[in-house]
Image (cartoon, rainbow, N blue to C red):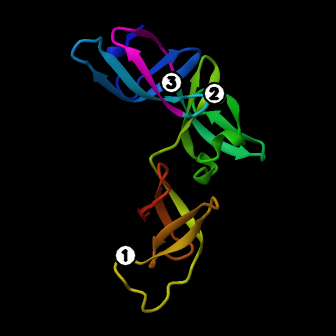
Amino acid sequence: MINVNDLRPGMTFEYENNTYVVVDANHSKSGRGQAHVKAKVKNLRTKSNTIITFTGGEKVKKAMVEKSKMQYLYSDGTDAFFMNNETYEQITIPVKELTWEFNFLTEGLNVQVTSFKEEVLGLVLPDKITLEIIEAEAAVKGDTTSGAQKKAILETNFEVVVPLFIEVGEKVIVSTIDGKYSGRA
């Protein structure tokens, strides 16, 4: 059991039949009343954020969320297939649960798959990933304003905004957190 006063970002716990990860926790003590802990949490099943207010001293059950290193193999349109790098076991995750992640998944990419009590919760991508540009707008001669940019399509069909000097066939580094261009590879 975890005392809610000890909640810190990144901790996982069970509360009212759901599994949460703490995004932020604030402690407040009013002059006369009891202390409260307001925790901004993310539901690991539904991926929704919410705020839960606890009375100081309450306890919640610690959730042991497992992270396994796996390799993305392929997708058949309905399911995505992953292989555990140590045991070579394969698992499937429905494609509809990985809409954001599919913007960056390429065959052979190593990711971390999170699970809780045999239930797959999702996957954690590397913070930055290298992808190839397959289509880009032409740079207009004379368009040299400071920081001029253009749209480009990555090999995963994700659209990203890149500087004018980036050409088709080049590899670029993209943030998987916000989908923004980070640099040349």
Dot 2 falls on a residue whose secondary structure is strand
- Magenta residues, start to end: 49-65
| Numbered disc in front, either 1 or 2 | 1
133 and 177: which one is in front? Answer: 177
Q: Which mark is residue 147?
A: 1
Instruction: Give the mark nearer the N terminus: 1 vs 2.
Output: 2
Residue occupied by mark 2 = 120
Magenta region, main secondary structure: strand
Residue in the picture at 47% in, 70% down: 162
16 shown above or below 24 = above
Query: Is the C terminus in the top left, top right, bottom left or bottom right quadrant?
Result: bottom left
Residue extending farthest left? 31
62 and 34: which one is in front? Answer: 34
Q: Which mark is residue 71?
A: none
Left of 61 or right of it: where is 98? right
Q: Position of residue 182 (x, y in %)?
A: 41, 61
Residue in the picture at 42% in, 7% down: 1
Instruction: Give the mark nearer the N terminus: 2 vs 3.
Output: 3
Dot 3 falls on a residue whose secondary structure is strand
Neighbour class for label 2 at 10 Å: few (<14), some, many (≥20)?
Answer: some
Residue in the picture at 51% in, 16% down: 14
User: Real-space Cα distance between discs 3 and 1?
Assistant: 40 Å
Q: Which mark is residue 20?
A: 3
144 shown above or below 119 = below
Q: Position of residue 30 (x, y in %)?
A: 25, 18
> Is residue 136 part of the magenta span, yes or no?
no
Dot 1 falls on a residue whose secondary structure is loop
Q: Amino acid at mark 2?
A: Val
Neighbour class for label 3 at 10 Å: few (<14), some, many (≥20)?
Answer: many
